[in-house]
Amino acid sequence: MDLAAAVCPQAPPGMETFANQVTGWVKWGVLALIGISAVASLGSILVGRIFSHPHASRYGAMGVAVVVMVAIIYTVILVILDSITGSGCT
């Protein structure tokens, strides 16, 4: 059983650079979408307050809550991926 625990996951030869590039693009893309969504949600709250439109404010508040939950899930997924593909054996 100890021998199986010592095996580290490795990308196939020549694949590591491509996999790192794709993972990096996905990470930055998701981070950009989270940022854009947060700004849009806060803008919806602001517009709803300025123009006395309660539905826009409510949707903006729900959007902020969703963005916070997605950011937490994003962080957890990154930790899980790093623990699976990270360097060294645990």
Image (spheres, rainbow, N blue to C red):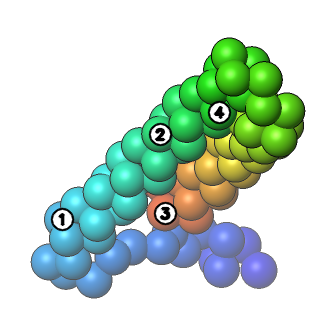
Q: Which amino acid does the dot numbered 1 rest on?
A: Thr
Q: Which residue is mark 3?
A: 85
- Label 3 to label 4, Cα distance in Å? 39 Å
Q: Which residue is mark 2?
A: 36
Mark 4: secondary structure: helix
Q: Does the rendering let one see residue 2?
A: yes
Which of the two marks, 4 or 2, is nearer to us in this view? 4
Q: Return the disc, 3 or 4, that comes first in the chain's sequence.
A: 4
- Label 1 to label 4, Cα distance in Å? 40 Å
Q: Which amino acid does the dot numbered 4 rest on?
A: Ser
- Label 2 to label 1, Cα distance in Å? 28 Å
Would you say 25 lies left or right of 54 here?
Answer: left
Residue farthest left in this picture: 14
Q: Return the disc, 1 or 3, that comes first in the chain's sequence.
A: 1
Q: How dense is the environment of label 2, judged by Cα within 10 Å: few (below 14), some, or many (20 and up)?
A: few
Q: Return the disc, 1 or 4, that comes first in the chain's sequence.
A: 1
Q: Which residue is mark 1?
A: 17
Quarter of the rendering occupied by the N terminus? bottom right
Q: Return the disc, 4 or 2, that comes first in the chain's sequence.
A: 2
- Label 4 to label 2, Cα distance in Å? 12 Å
Q: Return the disc, 2 or 1, that comes first in the chain's sequence.
A: 1
Mark 2: secondary structure: helix
Which of the two marks, 2 or 1, is nearer to us in this view? 2
**Res. 52 image quadrant:** top right
Labels 3 and 2 touching (C-beta < 8 A): no
Q: Residue at x 50, y 69 (%)?
A: 8
Which of the two marks, 1 or 4, is nearer to us in this view? 4
Q: Residue at x 83, y 41 (%)?
A: 55
Labels 1 and 3 touching (C-beta < 8 A): no
Q: Which amino acid does the dot numbered 3 rest on?
A: Thr
Q: Which residue is mark 4?
A: 44
Nearer-the-camera pick, 1 or 56: 56
